Image (tube, rainbow, N blue to C red):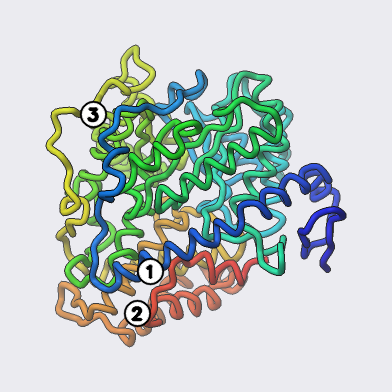
Amino acid sequence: MTQQIAGTELTFTQGFTAAERQVLTDDAVEFLADLVSKFTPQRNKLLAARACWQQKIDQGELPDFISETDSIRNGEWKIRGIPEDLRDRRVEITGPVERKMVINALNANVKVFMADFEDSLAPSWDKVIDGQINLHDAVNGTISYTNEAGKIYQLKPNPAVLIARVRGLHLPEKHVQWQGEAIPGGLFDFALYFFHNYRQLLAKGSGPYFYLPKTQSWQEAAWWSEVFSFAEDRFSLPRGTIKATVLIETLPAVFQMDEILYHLRDHIVGLNCGRWDYIFSYIKTLKNHADRVLPDRQSVTMDKSFLSAYSRLLIKTCHKRGAFAMGGMAAFIPSKDAEKNAWVLNKVRADKELEANNGHDGTWVAHPGLADTVMEVFSKVLGERHNQLEVLRENDAPISAAQLLEPCDGERTEAGMRANIRVAVQYIEAWISGNGCVPIYGLMEDAATAEISRTSIWQWIHHQKSLSDGQLVTKALFRQMLKEEMLVVREELGEARFNAGRFEEAARLMERITTQDELIDFLTLPGYELLA
């Protein structure tokens, strides 16, 4: 069923239930339609520019800093400023916009909850609508949830500050069309969260805050700045009311951090090391460069030189401009086994000590059970301070393009390849079933970590790499392993769970995106076709 909303150019492919009517009010849809008609053409040009840029890299060029923007990098300027309730972000938690998750995250021992419409949410129509209702109820302080056993979940006093992560530029919202095309998913998420919540957020001393994912260029940052300014002008709000943190999680963006901060200077408060996506982007961007193939995912850690250079450059760049430098995600999940849990907490502690000592202002966890450990690490380093903006890293040697592109050593093992297959298939199955964030083998997996798993194998096949035992990685070897690992997954999960799930579809999609000659940019794009 399709329906046109009177007075707008938007077509909705779903009928409106009571939930939709709550979110898609006439005024909200009118605002969304204005944003879509004004900003979609430019967004399409930006996506085309990404493809052109990638083509050059595929043909042998390497990413580098941009000489035309030297004046921005060398200039003395600062961002507009950081609101009071965002000055201390030492621990942030992230997770999907599901009702129970929202309550637990806001109640955790953290400063900020990043409510995620992107990598940890499979954006089925009911999920994105319910997500908007859940966040609106959270902003109003009225959110509650009762589970099957009758346990009631409610907000505690002083919940974490809420930041909404919208979908990246490349992701559509297929249930809403403009001029016969699916509208940008990010505009849909932004428009509805902003429209329904900005008044209440400002009234309680906070504001409409956003995380922007998958940015690749300063032009994309400038586009978001225009979107924010348009929304502020539309509702007579002062410039800079809307604040954003940009994830530096693509290889092109690391060469344009000054420029991204500059073009978003009215609205930006910081950059974040989205390290899992960054590793995925490194593989994807340099996919044709045989000398830059990464080893097993498990051995690509933050102490590797290309990742260490990225983290240090981000801190130095941000702090010079008065912006926060946020650390990356701890994807581990606490274990019920005491010995295993002690190992998990030690791993997380070491990782976060590295970030805190490097000068990061805060960091991410994926599970409330890690919050206390990480809070302790950052509080020890921060002392009385709210952040580390004064850590300028001025004595650091300049970081070169060569350092940021340096491949890391490590083995490609059969066990690593098989683990990649099991993780990716289980994640794809969860995603096409409507769950974007799932625990697999003790890690909270989202789209980024699954992307590393499948692009690594694609790259090994593409460049005819061998495993450490001498086996050549071919399409045939991958297909054979996929078949074998599906039996392992079936055994691990049990017949009932396996048969009730969509594992065969997931395996077919995994096979297609791993063996075709052209690498698909994002697994979420073909995955979206299989989603309700």
Q: In this view, does 298 lie above or below 361?
A: below
Element at label 2: helix
Q: Mark 2 points at which residue?
A: 481
The front one of 40 and 510 is 40
Q: Measuring 57% from the left and 28% from the top, which residue is drawn there?
A: 239
The front one of 473 and 13 is 13
Q: Measuring 53% from the left and 78% from the top, which residue is drawn there?
A: 504
Q: Can residue 342 be seen in this view?
A: no
Measured as percent of width and height from the top left, residue 147 is found at 70, 42
Quarter-of-image position of residue 75: top left
Q: Name the residue under label 1.
A: 454
Q: Is residue 108 above or below residue 449?
A: above
First along the sequence among labels 1 and 3: 3
Q: In this view, does 161 lie above or below 293?
A: above
Q: What residue type is labelled 3?
A: Asn
Position of 220 compared to 304: left or right? right
Q: Measuring 34% from the left and 15% from the top, which residue is drawn there?
A: 385
First along the sequence among labels 1 and 2: 1
Q: Nearer the viewer, mark 1 or mark 2?
A: 1
Q: Which amino acid does label 1 sit on?
A: Arg
Quarter-of-image position of residue 197: top right
Element at label 1: helix
